[in-house]
Image (spheres, coloured by chain):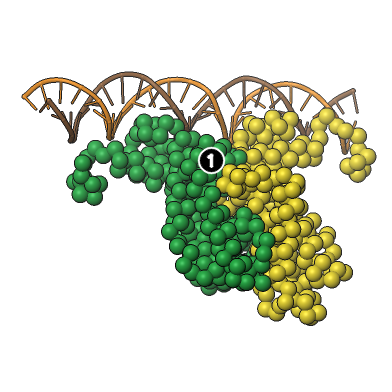
Chain colours: A yellow, B green, C orange, D brown
Amino acid sequence: MLATKTRKPRIRDAEATQKRILAAAKQEFAKKGLGGARVDDIAERAKANKRMIYHYFGSKEDLFQRVLEDAYVDIRTAEQKLELDHLDPKDALERLVRFTWKYYLDNPEFLTMVNSENLHKARHLKKSKVVQDISRRLVTMVDTILERGVKQGLFREGIDPVQLNITIAAIGYYYLTNRFTGAIIYELDLMSRQALDTRLQFNIDTIMRLVCK
Amino acid sequence: MLATKTRKPRIRDAEATQKRILAAAKQEFAKKGLGGARVDDIAERAKANKRMIYHYFGSKEDLFQRVLEDAYVDIRTAEQKLELDHLDPKDALERLVRFTWKYYLDNPEFLTMVNSENLHKARHLKKSKVVQDISRRLVTMVDTILERGVKQGLFREGIDPVQLNITIAAIGYYYLTNRFTGAIIYELDLMSRQALDTRLQFNIDTIMRLVCK
DNA sequence: AGTTCAACTAACCCAATAGTTACATAGAGG
DNA sequence: CCTCTATGTAACTATTGGGTTAGTTGAACT
């Protein structure tokens, strides 16, 4: 069989239709959550028939699970491509903080999907073996940076990589996921270029002060 | 008129019914979000007739707004009662971090309500004047602690109270609101007594390292 | 005791929505 | 070029769920 690229477009194209449905579902679920999203709207946005959603994905819940899984696979895959091992520990850590921030900023659907999944007590993620496996490598990554930093006398000893990981995620995640209520509470445009730059710098600072001697 | 306490219970009691509805709504909205919550379920949980909800609160959306406003008023009121001014700056800051953590832990509905509101781009909170006013005092509170700390030579200069505030909230909020997905990703029971103590200590440490010289 | 009004109930309405059924056809393989 | 199946459409169903209508009753105040 020919590669996807060279295959001339078909009127009927299962693969393309599935991709359109997944993309549409991601947008819809991100915008309205699992409960608020409408299967009809997903179908319309995907320029597909609703019947196809049920044919390919089984149910609304199953579709949600698939979109969620893909979202986790995407971020973890991007993280793995960072190649932090050749950088010195401080630069590696800063790069991870920057990456996490930028990923959340560029992929706000990820934040909404995670929120939605937590509202449902992670019952979809529980079923997913893939996500557990790829997540383990993230902790390893941070642990490696920490160990290298300690060995070079730059970082404090005994920092828990899981806690550090959570903190790196937290300081970006909270700011961005709560940007709407935050704007009202703090009476600031949290999404202006200036505000975003300020926050990223503050986050880098927070993490550096936390780990450095 | 007699005080609420001494008034003997009436079969018909507008005030009590409204309170039951608000309490039921808080639980329902927290559990299912705005979209997922069912007015019929709220009525049942409140042991009230659905008609009463519409009579007292107008619509599902208006009820949500009211519950959300109350939630913000509650946390801000509790914060104001902390009386941090007589404590030395370090203790005051630690107390605020502990308070924030404990409040989120004891009132998980607050986290869910805020998430839900952000999913809806804060369109309910925008209408609320009260919330803006009481939030201003929070920033002032942190700013006062910072100023006192700087004056005593304990804290660094130039720390933005808004950024600090956001960070204090973030490191607790993220951990607790994402406790279900977090448990899977990190393969840990994040809600065990031990895990909670560890996290709180880590958070205090993070904030202290951030502000202290 | 009677009047009045707010508190309350039950039954209903109808638009929206997850999921289905029945049918049509493109196009791959023989 | 014929057949069969995966891809697709459209119309339908059953149920849910926000909101309403119409009517009932407790109790506050005369």
Name the residue located 61 percent from the left edge and 57 percent from the top edge: B161
Can residue B47 be seen here?
yes
Q: Residue at x 34, y 44 (%)?
A: B20
Of A207 and A127, which appears nearest the observer?
A: A207
Label 1: chain?
B
Left or right: A188 as drawn, with respect to B110: right
Q: Place residue A191 in its image quadrant.
A: top right
Q: Which amino acid is tagged 1?
A: Leu
Callout 1: SS: helix
For the N terminus of chain A, the image quarter is: top right
**Residue at figure coordinates x 45%, y 43% from the top left:** B67
**Extreme residue toward the front, this view:** B151
Residue B35 location, x and y as percent?
53, 39
Q: How many marks?
A: 1
Residue A143 location (% of width, % of height):
73, 72
Question: Which quadrant does the C terminus of chain A fall into?
Answer: bottom right
* Residue A2 locus on image (x, y percent): 92, 43
Crowding near the residue tagged with mark 1, few <14, some 14–19, many ≥20 C-alpha atoms within 10 Å? many
Task: Identify which residue is drawn at 60% across, 40% down.
Answer: B121
* Viewer can see residue B181: no
Judge left or right: residue A106 versus residue D12: right
D17 over A211 or under it: above or below: above
Residue A212 lies, in percent from the top left, at 73, 73
Q: Is residue B152 left or right of residue A46?
A: left
Residue for badge 1 = B125
**Of the pair B158 and A206, the residue shown nearer to us:** B158
